[in-house]
Amino acid sequence: MRREDVRVAVVLLEGTNCEDESESYFRFLGAKAEKVHLKQFTGEAPSGVRRRLADYDLLMIPGGFANGDYVRAGAIFAARLKSKLAADLKDFVTSGKPVLGVCNGFQVLVEAGMLPALRGPITETPEAVLATNDSAHYECRPSYLRHDNGGSCAFTRTLRRGDVRTFVSAHGEGKFLLPREREKETLKELVDNDQVVFRYVDDRGRIAGYPWCPNGALDNIAAICNREGNVFGVQPHPERAFFGYLHPDWTRGRDPDAPGDGRAIFESALDYVTAMV
């Protein structure tokens, strides 16, 4: 498949954000990207604007505060997805097509049982949670993320293991947690499966606490993928570091027109799709 033939759906509804930038960046890289309201997929829109998930090659759930983040962050969005599109989503994932969830989108994927997905492509109940930050308030700052994946994740295959990237944290509920009674066993399973993709680190690439880890996440986890590597959730925003001039240090010798640290996520996803048979 050629990159110009790749169809990307950036799903939005009440309260999402960064869908405009995300659509633009996929288009910048040559793909056919469009914003699609959830109701266009669920049949709750006029027939002339309805869309079929199966017609797309890549699905992205952007950040924001979908449905006001009532109940828990991402919970209502996830419930709406599963109530209408569970079968379509399962087919999409099992076919190998990539799904990207950023910030609130990561929360949606966890709430929907699409991550970490240890017991199937979409589990009936969540297997993890993104809980309230230890600081008990919204955290917004650049974060250093160390790439700890061994190559299974479709969204980071252009990165070397140990690479440190700067993305932008902007969340109130980003603390990745696993069920307490199975925490050690489940964490070991995630590591053994190569599902941990990024960890929060300090400016020397070392595991560190607050403020380097802005939320208190278990094992400093900032991003994970499913066992197959085609569903990826990342808490800090890669799209907010797509160009060099979006970085906080862009005036300190960084080429403002050069790719930013987050562009690799988009590039890797499109490379993965174009290589699919």
Image (tube, helix red, strand yellow):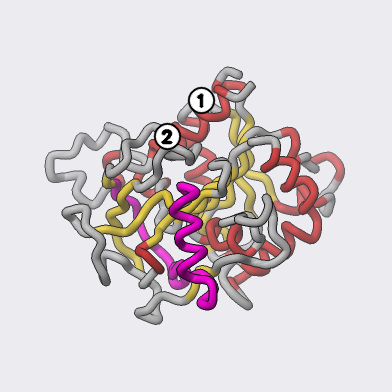
User: As drawn, which residue projects farthest toward the bottom?
Assistant: 136
Q: CA distance from mark 1 to mark 2?
A: 19 Å
Q: Position of residue 141 (x, y in %)?
A: 30, 62
Q: What SS does tag 1 mark?
A: loop
Q: Amino acid type of disc 1?
A: Gly
Disc on res. 228: none
Question: Which residue is label 2 attached to?
Answer: 157
Which quarter of the figure has residue 84?
bottom right
Which residue range is magenta in the image? 165-194
Let me know if residue 34 appears in the view.
no
Question: At which x and y percent is residue 2?
Answer: 57, 18
In-image side of 188 versus 36 (left or right): left
Instruction: Examine the rendering and report whether any part of residue 45 can be seen.
Output: yes
Residue in the picture at 66% in, 63% down: 77
Q: Nearer the viewer, residue 166 or 156?
A: 156
| Residue at (25% x, 61% y) in the render | 207
Amino acid at circle 2: Arg
Q: Is residue 181 magenta?
A: yes
The nearer-to-camera label among 1 and 2 is 2
Residue lying at 51% horizontally and 25% vertically, measured from the top left: 30
96 versus 194 height, above or below: above
Q: Position of residue 127 (x, y in %)?
A: 60, 65
| Residue behind mark 1 | 30
